[in-house]
Amino acid sequence: MTGLVKGAPAPLSDRVLRVTQDNPGMFTGPGTNTWVIGSGSGPVFVLDPGEEDDRHFDALAAAVGGRRVEAVLISHLHRDHWPLAPRVARHYGAVILTFSEQPPFTAGRLVDGRRLSVADTTMLALHTPGHASDHFCFLLEEERAVFTADLVMGWSTSIIAPPDGNLNQYMASLERLVELGRDGGIDVLHPGHGESIKPPLERIEEIRRHRRQRTDQALEAIVDGVATIPEMVRRIYSDVDSRLHGPAAFSLRAHLDALVEEGAVRETEPGRYEPGELQRRQGARILRPSR
Ligand SMILES: [Zn+2]
Protein backbone atom coordinates (compact mmCIF):
# COMPACT_ATOMS: atom_id res chain seq x y z
CA MET A 1 0.00 0.00 0.00
CA THR A 2 1.11 3.52 -0.72
CA GLY A 3 2.32 5.34 2.39
CA LEU A 4 0.26 8.12 3.86
CA VAL A 5 1.53 11.41 2.50
CA LYS A 6 -0.42 14.43 3.61
CA GLY A 7 -1.49 16.99 1.08
CA ALA A 8 -0.53 14.93 -1.97
CA PRO A 9 -3.16 12.73 -3.62
CA ALA A 10 -2.18 9.07 -3.36
CA PRO A 11 -3.51 6.87 -6.18
CA LEU A 12 -4.45 3.48 -4.71
CA SER A 13 -6.12 2.01 -7.80
CA ASP A 14 -7.57 2.97 -11.19
CA ARG A 15 -10.55 4.56 -9.45
CA VAL A 16 -9.36 5.51 -5.99
CA LEU A 17 -7.35 8.56 -4.91
CA ARG A 18 -6.70 9.22 -1.25
CA VAL A 19 -6.02 12.68 0.16
CA THR A 20 -5.08 12.60 3.84
CA GLN A 21 -5.86 15.70 5.85
CA ASP A 22 -3.22 17.11 8.19
CA ASN A 23 -5.36 16.74 11.32
CA PRO A 24 -3.61 14.03 13.32
CA GLY A 25 -4.87 13.21 16.79
CA MET A 26 -5.99 10.62 19.28
CA PHE A 27 -9.18 9.96 17.36
CA THR A 28 -8.00 10.69 13.82
CA GLY A 29 -4.68 8.83 13.82
CA PRO A 30 -2.50 10.25 11.05
CA GLY A 31 -5.44 12.35 9.79
CA THR A 32 -8.77 12.01 8.04
CA ASN A 33 -8.73 10.22 4.69
CA THR A 34 -10.69 12.01 1.97
CA TRP A 35 -11.49 9.89 -1.08
CA VAL A 36 -11.89 10.80 -4.73
CA ILE A 37 -13.52 7.89 -6.53
CA GLY A 38 -13.99 7.55 -10.27
CA SER A 39 -11.96 6.55 -13.31
CA GLY A 40 -10.07 8.39 -16.03
CA SER A 41 -11.35 11.85 -16.79
CA GLY A 42 -14.92 10.89 -15.94
CA PRO A 43 -17.01 12.20 -13.05
CA VAL A 44 -16.11 11.35 -9.46
CA PHE A 45 -17.54 10.94 -6.01
CA VAL A 46 -15.88 12.73 -3.11
CA LEU A 47 -16.21 10.85 0.17
CA ASP A 48 -15.57 12.48 3.56
CA PRO A 49 -14.11 15.88 2.63
CA GLY A 50 -12.85 16.31 6.20
CA GLU A 51 -12.47 19.45 8.25
CA GLU A 52 -12.69 23.01 6.96
CA ASP A 53 -9.18 23.95 5.91
CA ASP A 54 -7.76 25.80 2.87
CA ARG A 55 -4.81 23.51 2.34
CA HIS A 56 -6.94 20.41 2.41
CA PHE A 57 -9.42 22.01 0.04
CA ASP A 58 -6.56 22.77 -2.40
CA ALA A 59 -5.20 19.23 -2.13
CA LEU A 60 -8.65 17.82 -2.76
CA ALA A 61 -9.17 20.14 -5.75
CA ALA A 62 -5.85 18.93 -7.18
CA ALA A 63 -7.01 15.33 -6.79
CA VAL A 64 -10.33 16.05 -8.51
CA GLY A 65 -8.55 17.88 -11.33
CA GLY A 66 -10.96 19.11 -13.97
CA ARG A 67 -13.46 16.34 -13.33
CA ARG A 68 -17.11 16.78 -12.48
CA VAL A 69 -18.10 15.87 -8.92
CA GLU A 70 -21.24 13.77 -9.04
CA ALA A 71 -21.87 13.85 -5.30
CA VAL A 72 -20.18 14.56 -2.00
CA LEU A 73 -20.73 11.61 0.31
CA ILE A 74 -20.40 11.79 4.08
CA SER A 75 -19.91 8.57 6.04
CA HIS A 76 -21.23 10.06 9.28
CA LEU A 77 -21.50 13.41 10.97
CA HIS A 78 -18.50 13.34 13.29
CA ARG A 79 -16.64 16.59 12.83
CA ASP A 80 -13.43 15.13 11.50
CA HIS A 81 -15.29 13.84 8.41
CA TRP A 82 -17.56 16.52 7.00
CA PRO A 83 -17.25 20.29 7.70
CA LEU A 84 -15.53 20.95 4.36
CA ALA A 85 -18.45 19.30 2.52
CA PRO A 86 -20.64 22.38 1.92
CA ARG A 87 -17.72 24.27 0.39
CA VAL A 88 -16.78 21.36 -1.88
CA ALA A 89 -20.40 20.89 -2.91
CA ARG A 90 -20.79 24.59 -3.69
CA HIS A 91 -17.55 24.77 -5.63
CA TYR A 92 -18.43 21.81 -7.85
CA GLY A 93 -22.19 22.26 -7.95
CA ALA A 94 -22.61 18.80 -6.40
CA VAL A 95 -25.21 17.38 -4.04
CA ILE A 96 -24.29 16.21 -0.56
CA LEU A 97 -25.49 12.76 0.41
CA THR A 98 -25.62 11.80 4.05
CA PHE A 99 -27.93 9.78 6.23
CA SER A 100 -28.59 12.60 8.61
CA GLU A 101 -31.14 15.31 7.94
CA GLN A 102 -29.52 17.59 10.44
CA PRO A 103 -29.06 21.08 8.92
CA PRO A 104 -27.44 21.93 6.54
CA PHE A 105 -28.11 18.43 5.20
CA THR A 106 -31.66 18.25 3.95
CA ALA A 107 -31.51 16.85 0.45
CA GLY A 108 -30.57 13.49 -0.98
CA ARG A 109 -30.74 11.40 2.13
CA LEU A 110 -28.75 8.18 1.87
CA VAL A 111 -30.58 4.91 2.27
CA ASP A 112 -29.22 1.46 2.84
CA GLY A 113 -28.79 -0.48 -0.39
CA ARG A 114 -28.84 2.55 -2.67
CA ARG A 115 -26.52 2.23 -5.67
CA LEU A 116 -24.80 5.38 -6.85
CA SER A 117 -23.15 5.17 -10.24
CA VAL A 118 -21.16 7.32 -12.59
CA ALA A 119 -19.60 5.96 -15.77
CA ASP A 120 -17.91 2.68 -14.78
CA THR A 121 -17.97 3.29 -11.04
CA THR A 122 -20.66 1.96 -8.72
CA MET A 123 -20.91 2.67 -5.02
CA LEU A 124 -23.30 0.61 -2.91
CA ALA A 125 -24.35 2.44 0.26
CA LEU A 126 -24.38 0.29 3.40
CA HIS A 127 -25.94 1.56 6.60
CA THR A 128 -23.53 0.31 9.27
CA PRO A 129 -24.52 1.84 12.62
CA GLY A 130 -22.60 1.23 15.82
CA HIS A 131 -19.77 3.75 15.90
CA ALA A 132 -22.50 6.30 15.15
CA SER A 133 -26.15 5.72 14.37
CA ASP A 134 -25.84 7.48 10.98
CA HIS A 135 -22.69 5.62 9.90
CA PHE A 136 -22.40 4.40 6.30
CA CYS A 137 -19.81 2.32 4.47
CA PHE A 138 -19.61 2.18 0.68
CA LEU A 139 -18.76 -0.81 -1.46
CA LEU A 140 -16.99 0.14 -4.69
CA GLU A 141 -18.36 -2.81 -6.59
CA GLU A 142 -15.94 -2.85 -9.55
CA GLU A 143 -12.96 -3.14 -7.17
CA ARG A 144 -14.57 -5.11 -4.33
CA ALA A 145 -13.29 -2.34 -2.06
CA VAL A 146 -15.15 -1.12 1.01
CA PHE A 147 -14.74 2.40 2.34
CA THR A 148 -15.17 1.63 6.02
CA ALA A 149 -14.85 5.13 7.54
CA ASP A 150 -14.75 4.54 11.32
CA LEU A 151 -16.21 1.02 11.35
CA VAL A 152 -12.90 -0.74 10.72
CA MET A 153 -9.47 0.83 10.97
CA GLY A 154 -6.08 -0.82 11.00
CA TRP A 155 -4.36 1.26 13.67
CA SER A 156 -7.05 1.46 16.31
CA THR A 157 -10.39 0.11 17.37
CA SER A 158 -13.39 2.38 16.89
CA ILE A 159 -14.75 4.53 19.66
CA ILE A 160 -18.28 3.52 20.54
CA ALA A 161 -19.75 6.24 22.70
CA PRO A 162 -23.34 5.76 23.87
CA PRO A 163 -26.02 6.84 23.48
CA ASP A 164 -25.40 7.37 19.76
CA GLY A 165 -22.86 4.54 19.59
CA ASN A 166 -24.19 1.03 20.17
CA LEU A 167 -22.02 -2.05 20.51
CA ASN A 168 -24.60 -4.63 19.46
CA GLN A 169 -25.25 -2.60 16.31
CA TYR A 170 -21.52 -2.25 15.80
CA MET A 171 -21.03 -6.03 16.00
CA ALA A 172 -23.91 -6.54 13.57
CA SER A 173 -22.30 -4.09 11.14
CA LEU A 174 -19.01 -6.00 11.32
CA GLU A 175 -20.94 -9.21 10.72
CA ARG A 176 -22.42 -7.63 7.63
CA LEU A 177 -18.95 -6.92 6.26
CA VAL A 178 -17.92 -10.51 7.00
CA GLU A 179 -20.95 -11.72 5.04
CA LEU A 180 -20.07 -9.44 2.13
CA GLY A 181 -16.48 -10.59 2.27
CA ARG A 182 -17.28 -14.28 2.16
CA ASP A 183 -16.09 -16.08 -0.98
CA GLY A 184 -13.80 -13.24 -1.98
CA GLY A 185 -16.51 -10.59 -2.05
CA ILE A 186 -14.16 -7.95 -0.63
CA ASP A 187 -10.52 -7.42 -1.59
CA VAL A 188 -9.55 -4.38 0.41
CA LEU A 189 -10.81 -1.96 3.07
CA HIS A 190 -10.18 1.77 2.79
CA PRO A 191 -10.69 3.25 6.28
CA GLY A 192 -11.44 6.81 7.30
CA HIS A 193 -8.11 7.04 9.11
CA GLY A 194 -4.86 5.20 8.46
CA GLU A 195 -3.67 2.78 5.82
CA SER A 196 -5.84 0.53 3.69
CA ILE A 197 -6.28 -3.03 4.92
CA LYS A 198 -5.60 -6.11 2.85
CA PRO A 199 -6.59 -8.88 3.24
CA PRO A 200 -9.68 -7.54 5.00
CA LEU A 201 -11.30 -10.39 6.91
CA GLU A 202 -8.53 -11.12 9.43
CA ARG A 203 -8.64 -7.57 10.72
CA ILE A 204 -12.42 -7.67 11.06
CA GLU A 205 -12.21 -10.96 12.96
CA GLU A 206 -9.50 -9.53 15.20
CA ILE A 207 -11.73 -6.57 16.09
CA ARG A 208 -14.68 -8.86 16.80
CA ARG A 209 -12.56 -11.05 19.07
CA HIS A 210 -11.23 -8.03 20.92
CA ARG A 211 -14.74 -6.67 21.52
CA ARG A 212 -16.09 -9.99 22.70
CA GLN A 213 -13.16 -10.30 25.07
CA ARG A 214 -13.85 -6.84 26.53
CA THR A 215 -17.52 -7.66 26.95
CA ASP A 216 -16.60 -10.90 28.74
CA GLN A 217 -14.19 -9.00 30.98
CA ALA A 218 -16.94 -6.54 31.91
CA LEU A 219 -19.29 -9.40 32.76
CA GLU A 220 -16.60 -11.18 34.78
CA ALA A 221 -15.95 -8.00 36.74
CA ILE A 222 -19.64 -7.63 37.56
CA VAL A 223 -19.95 -11.27 38.59
CA ASP A 224 -16.95 -10.64 40.87
CA GLY A 225 -18.86 -7.79 42.49
CA VAL A 226 -17.19 -4.85 40.77
CA ALA A 227 -20.23 -2.64 40.39
CA THR A 228 -19.25 0.77 39.03
CA ILE A 229 -17.72 2.02 35.81
CA PRO A 230 -14.61 3.69 37.30
CA GLU A 231 -13.74 0.50 39.22
CA MET A 232 -14.27 -1.59 36.10
CA VAL A 233 -12.14 0.75 33.98
CA ARG A 234 -9.25 0.39 36.45
CA ARG A 235 -9.57 -3.38 36.35
CA ILE A 236 -10.21 -3.99 32.66
CA TYR A 237 -8.07 -1.26 31.14
CA SER A 238 -5.09 -1.65 33.46
CA ASP A 239 -2.96 -2.24 30.35
CA VAL A 240 -4.05 1.06 28.77
CA ASP A 241 -2.48 4.51 29.32
CA SER A 242 -4.49 6.18 32.10
CA ARG A 243 -4.96 9.25 29.87
CA LEU A 244 -7.20 7.02 27.78
CA HIS A 245 -9.35 5.98 30.72
CA GLY A 246 -11.89 8.71 29.87
CA PRO A 247 -12.58 7.31 26.37
CA ALA A 248 -12.27 3.81 27.86
CA ALA A 249 -15.16 4.60 30.22
CA PHE A 250 -17.32 5.49 27.20
CA SER A 251 -16.29 2.31 25.53
CA LEU A 252 -17.02 0.27 28.66
CA ARG A 253 -20.42 1.90 28.88
CA ALA A 254 -21.08 0.52 25.38
CA HIS A 255 -20.18 -3.00 26.56
CA LEU A 256 -22.42 -2.64 29.61
CA ASP A 257 -25.32 -1.40 27.51
CA ALA A 258 -24.85 -4.41 25.24
CA LEU A 259 -24.89 -6.75 28.26
CA VAL A 260 -28.01 -5.06 29.61
CA GLU A 261 -29.70 -5.42 26.19
CA GLU A 262 -28.87 -9.13 26.28
CA GLY A 263 -30.17 -9.50 29.84
CA ALA A 264 -26.76 -10.68 31.10
CA VAL A 265 -26.51 -7.82 33.61
CA ARG A 266 -28.85 -5.36 35.30
CA GLU A 267 -28.30 -1.68 35.96
CA THR A 268 -29.69 -1.32 39.46
CA GLU A 269 -29.25 2.46 39.59
CA PRO A 270 -27.48 4.76 37.14
CA GLY A 271 -23.88 3.55 36.87
CA ARG A 272 -24.26 0.51 39.18
CA TYR A 273 -24.42 -3.01 37.82
CA GLU A 274 -25.11 -6.49 39.08
CA PRO A 275 -25.37 -9.88 37.38
CA GLY A 276 -28.60 -10.45 35.52
CA GLU A 277 -31.14 -13.16 36.08
CA LEU A 278 -29.19 -15.71 34.05
CA GLN A 279 -26.03 -15.46 36.15
CA ARG A 280 -27.87 -15.63 39.44
CA ARG A 281 -29.98 -18.58 38.41
CA GLN A 282 -27.02 -20.58 37.28
CA GLY A 283 -24.63 -19.44 39.99
CA ALA A 284 -22.15 -19.53 37.18
CA ARG A 285 -19.32 -17.23 36.35
CA ILE A 286 -19.69 -16.42 32.72
CA LEU A 287 -22.73 -17.28 30.77
CA ARG A 288 -24.02 -15.16 28.00
CA PRO A 289 -25.64 -16.02 24.74
CA SER A 290 -22.84 -17.17 22.47
CA ARG A 291 -22.52 -15.52 19.10
ZN1 LIG B 1 -16.38 9.00 13.75
Image: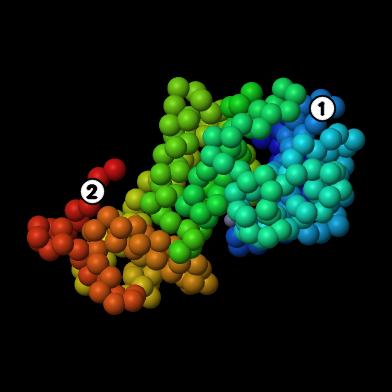
The residue drawn where x is 36% and y is 73% is 229
Q: Nearer the viewer, residue 153 or 35?
A: 35
Residue 33 seen by the camera: no
Q: Is residue 179 above or below residue 105?
A: above
**Element under disc 2:** loop
Instruction: Give the image quadrant in which the ligand numbered 1 is located.
Output: bottom right
Q: Nearer the viewer, residue 94 or 29?
A: 94
User: In the image, is 15 to the left or to the right of 53?
Assistant: left
Say which quadrant the N terminus sits in: top right
In the rendered image, residue 134, in percent from the top left (x then y), is placed at 55, 52
When asked about the image quadrant of residue 16, the answer is: top right
Tell me the tag on residue 17. none
In the rendered image, residue 227, in percent from the top left (x then y), is placed at 27, 74
Residue at which label 2 appears: 289
When asked about the image quadrant of residue 102, the answer is: bottom right
Residue at which label 1 appears: 42
The residue drawn where x is 87% and y is 48% is 91
Q: Residues within 10 Å of mark 1 (few under 14, many from 20)?
A: some
Tag 1: amino acid = Gly
Q: Is residue 38 above or below residue 219?
A: above
The residue drawn where x is 53% and y is 31% is 199
